[in-house]
Image: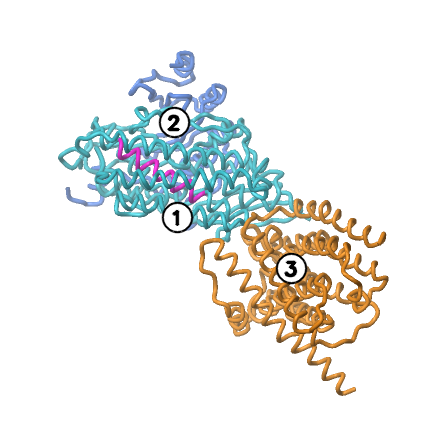
C-alpha cells in the first residue's frame, strides 16, 4: 500500500490515526480534519473523490465522510461540521461540486466557498435538510412503529 | 449570432428529464450548464424507513436499466457488515446477471446514440439484438426489467437451463461481432459524427472524477471489477478495456469491446458454474451494528453504497452514489467549442441516467 | 381565349398541377416511408397514411405564436404551395399545357426554391430558438445543394443555347445529359431534406427546426408543399434526363419509372446513413457538388 500517503494523511491538520478495516479499506475519524488540505493532498496524489456521505448528528450537526479512491485502495475520512458548516472542496476538486450541493439540499450543511451553491435535487417547495430524520430503531420509535 | 438553447427537460433527444442550457455562438457551443432533480424521489430517505427485505425491492427501483446492480451492491454492503459468506454458485449467478445487464445497457445506449445522430436503421438493428438479451434475462429471472435476483447472502433464483442461455449468448455475441462493431467502425457518416467529437482529456476526467466507460475512454484504467474484485470476476479472469482518444468514438469502442468481454465472462461462468446452495437457509432480516462501503461496476461505472446499521431490521443510513452523479457534470468539459449539432450525441455519449441521479 | 383559361386552370388544379401531383406526392412519400420501414424491420404505414396525416392536420385548430402576424403564419405555407404548384403546371409533361416561353426554365428554377425560402422565413419569423437555428441551417443547405442543382440545369440550357424548356428538351441525348443527371441526383437528398442531409429538421437537436411553431392547417400546407416538391423534383428530373419515347403513354411510364427510381435511391441512402453536421454537408456540396457542377458545365460548353 501507499505508506507515504498514509503518513501524510495522518499528519494533516486535525488528523487522527488511520484504521484498516479490510485489505483495501482505510478509515479515519477526525472531527476537525482540515478538508481543504485533504483535498489538495488527494488531488496531488491523483486520487479521485468517489463521493461524500452525510449523516445527521444530534444537535443539528452533520457527520460527513469523504470517500477517496487511489488505485486499489479506498480512503474514508470522517469529519464533523461546526455550526453545520464545512469549507468547500469544490474549488479544488470539480467532482465535489454536485456532491456538496446535494448535501446542502438534503442535510442543510453550508459549504463555505462553494462556487455555485444553487439547489440541485431539492424540489423548490421543500426546505433544505429534509433528510435529517433518524433511521434504524430510533426512526421506528419516532414513527411509533412496532417491531 | 449568440443563442441560448435549452435542451430539456422534455426534448426528443432525451429519454429522461434533465436540462442542458446551451450558450452558443452560431453553431459553436460556448458553455453548457446542466440541471437535474426533475424526478427526485428521496429513495435514500425511504430506505431508512423500511426494513432490509423491503429495501431490496426499493433500491432495485433506483434505475430502470441497471436495477440488478443496486440490489447487488446493497446486499454486498449488508453481507460485509454481517460477515456472511456468499455461496459459490450464487457468486457465479450474480456475475452472469451483472454481465447480462451490462450487455442490455450498452446495447440500449448504442441504440439511443444511433438515434441521436439520426441513424434510425442502426437503432432498430441494435434494439432487435437487445431484445434477445431481454429474452435471456426473462428466461433466467422471469422478469425483463427488475429481476429481483439478489437477496442478502445469495441469489433468489437458480439458472436451471444453462445450455439455452449459453446458446442465446453466443448468438448475441455473433450479432455484436458481425453487425454492430463493423457498422460503428466503418460507416463513414458515423465516423464523421463521432471522431474527435466531445473530447474529455485525461486531466479533466480525473478532476471530474468520471467513472466507468467514460473514464476508460479517456485512458484511465479504472474498473471496480479489476480494482476491488467482487462476485466471481477474479476466478473468471476479467480483462479491462481502455482507449486513449478521449472522444465519442473511444466511448463507442470501449462499450463495444466491453460487450464482447461480457459475452466471454458469461460463457465462461456458465460453463464453470459450480454446484451448491444459492443462499443461506434462513432469510436474513437483521444486520448487526456496523457500517460498510460496497462498490460494484455498473454498466455506466462505479456504484457506491454506504450502509450503516444499528442492529435492528432497519438501516440507519443508506447512501447511494450512482455513476451518473459524477459523469453528467463532465458534459460541460466535453461541450465547449463543439458544434451545436453534436450536443445530442455528446450528452448521450455520457449515457446520462436521470433516474439514477435523481434517486 | 376561354378555352385557354380552362386549359390553364386544368393544368394548375388537376394535371399536372395540384390534384394529381398531391396524390402522386403522397404516394412517393408513403413509398419512401414504407421502404425505409421495411429496411428497419418495421411494418411501415398503409399507403393512405400521408393523406390521413394531411386531413388530420387540416381538422386541427392552429395556434399562431405570439408576436407573429397571422398573415405571415398562414401566408408562408400558402406561398410555398402556390409556387410549387405553378412549377408543376408549367412543366411540359404529357397531357399538360404547351405554353413554353423564353426563360420559362429560369421561372421553374426560381419557383422551385420558394418552399425552401418560405421554410427559412417561417423559421426566423417563428420567434423560437429551434426555428431560428433550423432556418439558418436550411439557408446554408440551400447555398450548398443549389450549386450542383442549378449547374446541372444550366448545363443543358448552355448546350441548347436557350433557357426555353421546349428548346432544352429538343436536344438529343448526349454525354452532357449523363453528367448533368449525376449532378442533379447529387442535389436531390438535400433538396428533400432526407438523411444524411436532414439537418434543418434534425429532431434530436432542434426538435422540428423551422416548422417547430407550425401546427394544424398551416403545417398541413407545408407538408403538402413538401409532397408537391417531391413530385416537382422527380418530374423535372424525368423531363430533363429521360429521353422522350414515341408515344405519350410510354413516355409517361418512363417518367414514372425514373421518379420511382429517385424515391428508391433516396430511401436507400436515408436508411444507410447517420445525419451529417451542417458544416460537413456544406463541405460535401462545395467539393463534390462543385466538381460535378463544373464538369457538366465544361462539357456543355465544349460540345
Mark 1 Cα shell of 10 Å, populated few (<14), some (14-19), many (≥20): few
In the rendering, what colour is chain B?
Answer: cyan
* Image location of residue B51, percent across then percent down: 22, 41
Q: Nearer the viewer, mark 2 or mark 3?
A: 3
Foreground residue, C38 or A41? Answer: C38
Q: Which residue is mark 2?
A: A67
Q: Secondary structure at mark 2?
A: strand
Q: Is residue C70 left or right of residue A83?
A: right
**Quick check: A132 left or right of B254?**
left
Give the CA separation, mark 1 to mark 3. 40 Å
Predominant secondary structure in magenta? helix
Indicate the chain on which mark 2 is placed.
A
Check disc 1 and report the residue beneath it: A126
The residue carrying mark 3 is C123
Marks 2 and 1 belong to one chain: yes
Q: For residue B108: magenta?
A: yes
Please state the extent of the stretch shown in magenta in the rendering. Answer: B92-109
Give the number of the mark in front: 1 or 3: 3
Counting from the top left corner in percent of width and height, residue B269 is at 29, 31
Using the image as rendered, state which of residue C144 and residue B56 is in the foreground: C144
Give the SS element for disc 3: helix
Chain for colour orange: C
Chain A shade in the render: blue
Q: Are marks 1 and 3 in contact (CB under 8 Å)?
A: no
- Tag 1 subunit: A
Residue beneath the point at 47% across and 30% down = B215
Q: Which corner quadrant of the image does residue C92 belong to?
A: bottom right
Amino acid at each position: 500500500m501507499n505508506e507515504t500517503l498514509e503518513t501524510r494523511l495522518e499528519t494533516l491538520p486535525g488528523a487522527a490515526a488511520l484504521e484498516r478495516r479490510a485489505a483495501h479499506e482505510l478509515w479515519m475519524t477526525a472531527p476537525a480534519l482540515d478538508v481543504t488540505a485533504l483535498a489538495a493532498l488527494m488531488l496531488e496524489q491523483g486520487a479521485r473523490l468517489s463521493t461524500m456521505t452525510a449523516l445527521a448528528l444530534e444537535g443539528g450537526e452533520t457527520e460527513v465522510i469523504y470517500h477517496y479512491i487511489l488505485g486499489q485502495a479506498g480512503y474514508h475520512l470522517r469529519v464533523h461540521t461546526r455550526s453545520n458548516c464545512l469549507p468547500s472542496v469544490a474549488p479544488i476538486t470539480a467532482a465535489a461540486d454536485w456532491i456538496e450541493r446535494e448535501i446542502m439540499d438534503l442535510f442543510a450543511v453550508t459549504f463555505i466557498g462553494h462556487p455555485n451553491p444553487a439547489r440541485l435535487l431539492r424540489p423548490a417547495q421543500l426546505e433544505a435538510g429534509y433528510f435529517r430524520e433518524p433511521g434504524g430503531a430510533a426512526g421506528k420509535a419516532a414513527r411509533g412503529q412496532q417491531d | 449570432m449568440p443563442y441560448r438553447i435549452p435542451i430539456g427537460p422534455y426534448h426528443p433527444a432525451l429519454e429522461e428529464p434533465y436540462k442542458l442550457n446551451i450558450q452558443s455562438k452560431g453553431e459553436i457551443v460556448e458553455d453548457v450548464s446542466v440541471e437535474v432533480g426533475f424526478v427526485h424521489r428521496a429513495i435514500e430517505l425511504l430506505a431508512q424507513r423500511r426494513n432490509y427485505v423491503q429495501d431490496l425491492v426499493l433500491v432495485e427501483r433506483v434505475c430502470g436499466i441497471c436495477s440488478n446492480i443496486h440490489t447487488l451492491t446493497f446486499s454486498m454492503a449488508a453481507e460485509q457488515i454481517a460477515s456472511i459468506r456468499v455461496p459459490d454458485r450464487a457468486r457465479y449467478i450474480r456475475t452472469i446477471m451483472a454481465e447480462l445487464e451490462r450487455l442490455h445497457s450498452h446495447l440500449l445506449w448504442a441504440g439511443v446514440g444511433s438515434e441521436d445522430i439520426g441513424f434510425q436503421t442502426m437503432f432498430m438493428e441494435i434494439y432487435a439484438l437487445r431484445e434477445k438479451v431481454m429474452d435471456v434475462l426473462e428466461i433466467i429471472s422471469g422478469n425483463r426489467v427488475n429481476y429481483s435476483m439478489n437477496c442478502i447472502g445469495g441469489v433468489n433464483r437458480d439458472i436451471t437451463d444453462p445450455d439455452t442461455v449459453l446458446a442465446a449468448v453466443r448468438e448475441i455475441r455473433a450479432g455484436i461481432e458481425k453487425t454492430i462493431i463493423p457498422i460503428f467502425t466503418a460507416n463513414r457518416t458515423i465516423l464523421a459524427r463521432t471522431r474527435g467529437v466531445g473530447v474529455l482529456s485525461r486531466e479533466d476526467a480525473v478532476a471530474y472524477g468520471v467513472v466507468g466507460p467514460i473514464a476508460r475512454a479517456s485512458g484511465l484504467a479504472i474498473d471496480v471489477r479489476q480494482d476491488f474484485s467482487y462476485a466471481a470476476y477474479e476466478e473468471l479472469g476479467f480483462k479491462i478495456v481502455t482507449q486513449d482518444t478521449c472522444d465519442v468514438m473511444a466511448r463507442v469502442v470501449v462499450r463495444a469491446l466491453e460487450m464482447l468481454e461480457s459475452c466471454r465472462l458469461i460463457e465462461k461462468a456458465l460453463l464453470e458454474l459450480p454446484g451448491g446452495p444459492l443462499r443461506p437457509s434462513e432469510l436474513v432480516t437483521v444486520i448487526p451494528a456496523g457500517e460498510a462501503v460496497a462498490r460494484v461496476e455498473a454498466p455506466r461505472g462505479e456504484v457506491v453504497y454506504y450502509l450503516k446499521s444499528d442492529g435492528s431490521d432497519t438501516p440507519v443510513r443508506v447512501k447511494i452514489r450512482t455513476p451518473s452523479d459524477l459523469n453528467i457534470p463532465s458534459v460541460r468539459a466535453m461541450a465547449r467549442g463543439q458544434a451545436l449539432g453534436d450536443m445530442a450525441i455528446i450528452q448521450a455519449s455520457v449515457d446520462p441516467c436521470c433516474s439514477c441521479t435523481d434517486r | 381565349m376561354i378555352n385557354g383559361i380552362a386549359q390553364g386552370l386544368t393544368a394548375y388544379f388537376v394535371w399536372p398541377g395540384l390534384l394529381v401531383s398531391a396524390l402522386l406526392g403522397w404516394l412517393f412519400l408513403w413509398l419512401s416511408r414504407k421502404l425505409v420501414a421495411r429496411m428497419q424491420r418495421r411494418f411501415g404505414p398503409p399507403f393512405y397514411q400521408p393523406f390521413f396525416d394531411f386531413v388530420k392536420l387540416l381538422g386541427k385548430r392552429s395556434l399562431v405564436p405570439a408576436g407573429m402576424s397571422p398573415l405571415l403564419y398562414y401566408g408562408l405555407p400558402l406561398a410555398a404551395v402556390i409556387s410549387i404548384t405553378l412549377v408543376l403546371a408549367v412543366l411540359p409533361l404529357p397531357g399538360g399545357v404547351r405554353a413554353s416561353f423564353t426563360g420559362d426554365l429560369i421561372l421553374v428554377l426560381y419557383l422551385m426554391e420558394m418552399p425552401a425560402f418560405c421554410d427559412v422565413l417561417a423559421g426566423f419569423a417563428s420567434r423560437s430558438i429551434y426555428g431560428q437555428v433550423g432556418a439558418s441551417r436550411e439557408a446554408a443547405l440551400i447555398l450548398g445543394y443549389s450549386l450542383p442543382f442549378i449547374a446541372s440545369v444550366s448545363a443543358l440550357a448552355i448546350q441548347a443555347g436557350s433557357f426555353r424548356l421546349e428548346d432544352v428538351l429538343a436536344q438529343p441525348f448526349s454525354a452532357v445529359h449523363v453528367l448533368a443527371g449525376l449532378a442533379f441526383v447529387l442535389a436531390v437528398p438535400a433538396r428533400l431534406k432526407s438523411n444524411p442531409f436532414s439537418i434543418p429538421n434534425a429532431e434530436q437537436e432542434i426538435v422540428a427546426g423551422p416548422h417547430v411553431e407550425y401546427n394544424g392547417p398551416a403545417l398541413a400546407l407545408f407538408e403538402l408543399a413538401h409532397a408537391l416538391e417531391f413530385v416537382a423534383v422527380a418530374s423535372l428530373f424525368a423531363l430533363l434526363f429521360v429521353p422522350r419515347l414515341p408515344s405519350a403513354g410510354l413516355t409517361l411510364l418512363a417518367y414514372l419509372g425514373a421518379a420511382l427510381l429517385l424515391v428508391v435511391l433516396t430511401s436507400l441512402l436515408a436508411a444507410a446513413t447517420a445525419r451529417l453536421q451542417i458544416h460537413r454537408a456544406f463541405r460535401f456540396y462545395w467539393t463534390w457538388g462543385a466538381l460535378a457542377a463544373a464538369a457538366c458545365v465544361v462539357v456543355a460548353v465544349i460540345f
